Image: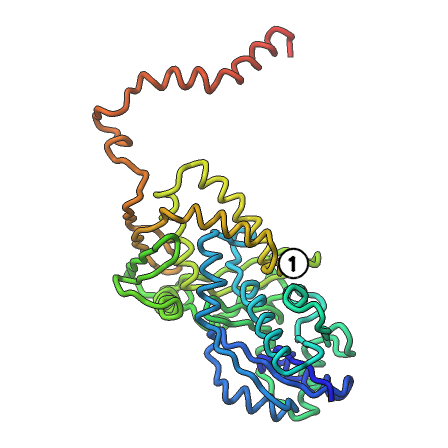
Amino acid sequence: MAKVVLAYSGGLDTSITIPWLKENYGYEVIAMVADLGQGEDYEEIRAKALKSGASGVHVRDVKQEFIRDFIFPLVRAGAVYEGKYLLGTSAARPLIAKCLVEVAEAEGAEAIAHGATGKGNDQVRFEVGIKALNPGLKVIAPWREWHIRSRQEAMEYAAARDIPVPATKERPFSVDRNLWHLSHEGGLLEDPGNAPPDNLYLTVVPPECAPDTPRFVEIEFEEGVPKRVDGVELDPVGLLERLNAVGGANGVGIADMVENRLIGMKSRGIYETPGGTIIIAAHRELELLTLDRNTLHFKDTAAVRYAELVYDGLWFTPLREALDAFVAVTQKTVTGRVRMKLYKGNCVPAGIWSPYSLYDQELSTFEKDDIYDQRDAAGFINLFGLPVKMQALVRKRTGG
């Protein structure tokens, strides 16, 4: 019997995919579960996959690799999609694709299947990643083939086969969770006019319920990579877990946005990224202190393109690798310590220190100094403004 490797999470879509693949393709189904820090009971998920009809289950613990090799590069690049989305789902998909290909090659499978819908971005991210790593593998996307057209029909399909699923009529949200973020889509959130319900958030305390006193946290970076929290050195997973706890308790990291999907439609999602919000904000403050104006501004332009590449599923591409090489040069001086003040959803700087600081207090002071001769500014302004002056003279002479 030919084999297919299924990207399995234990959620609604992938749970019903196992019997569907067996019924419609006659495949032996191997489930692959990537532990990205979802906090799940993986023995329970393994048992559920086997009960649903899988012949084998691979659970891959890739949390350290996820944060070190996929998330921290985003931090260094400053990549944020459309100014709000910190790319939690997007960055996870190429790593899951990598795991799928590795399991498929080890099992001798001829195909890979995923539970992404035909309306979303993940189908692109999975399949482009698989093509980049092993273009000979067949890809099956049941949502593009089967008769099921809604989450309600999917729940009915699962119930008919005695498959338990986490989605219910009371909580019909599509949830994606990993160590970096948690996203919510679907249900009443599909109407942008609806505010998120009070019981939606799972990792972040609603800001109005956060403590009435601010919490200060210090993060130390080495070449753009966070290494320590409050003076304690931590591995990537431990560091993010610490900041997730601190940020979540203080209402930090909620993003409610209508975004532009790659395939052409807009979608509304609610994201919880407590630790990531703190890290991104602190990293930006350190760059403002240590990068010169030209480098910083050009890097901002590259960051937009970097975010689009990751969002679009183009992780395994020469352009992303080339941008990483550029970013690596910019981060050589992004070393130092940043103190952030967290208060009821706000995350603001409260002190920055770096041995590579380009800020000179004596030069920038409003008080008396012996370094800067203000008379020099007149000549600079004359030369800097010369093109504007010439344009004005021509307009005056020609009556324009």
In this rendering, position of residue 352 left or right of residue 11: left
Q: Quadrant of residue 253?
A: bottom left
Asked if residue 167 shows in the view, the reply is no
Give the camera-side residue of 399 and 223. 223
Q: Residue at x 53, y 50 (%)?
A: 323
| Residue that label 1 marks | 261
Colour scheme: rainbow
- Nearer to the camera, 167 or 88: 88
Q: Does 92 sit above or below residue 162? A: above
Query: Relative to 266, is 331 on the left or the right?
Result: left
Image position, residue 101 (x, y; %): 62, 73
Percent across and percent down for residue 34 are: 53, 76
Q: Position of residue 241 (x, y in %)?
A: 38, 70
Quarter of the image with the N terminus in it:
bottom right
> Is residue 199 toward the left or the right of residue 3 in the image?
left
316 and 146: which one is in front?
Answer: 316
Res. 310 visible in picture: yes
| Quarter of the rendering occupied by the C terminus | top right
Which quadrant of the structure image shows residue 345? bottom left
| Residue occupying image coordinates x 47% and y 49% | 327
Name which quarter of the figure residue 391 lies in.
top right
Circle count: 1
Mark 1, secondary structure of its residue: loop
Residue type pointed to by label 1: Arg
Q: Residue at x 48, y 52 (%)?
A: 77
Q: Residues within 10 Å of mark 1 (few under 14, many from 20)?
A: some
Q: Residue furthest top?
A: 397
- Residue 192 lies, with reference to residue 33, above or below; the image says above
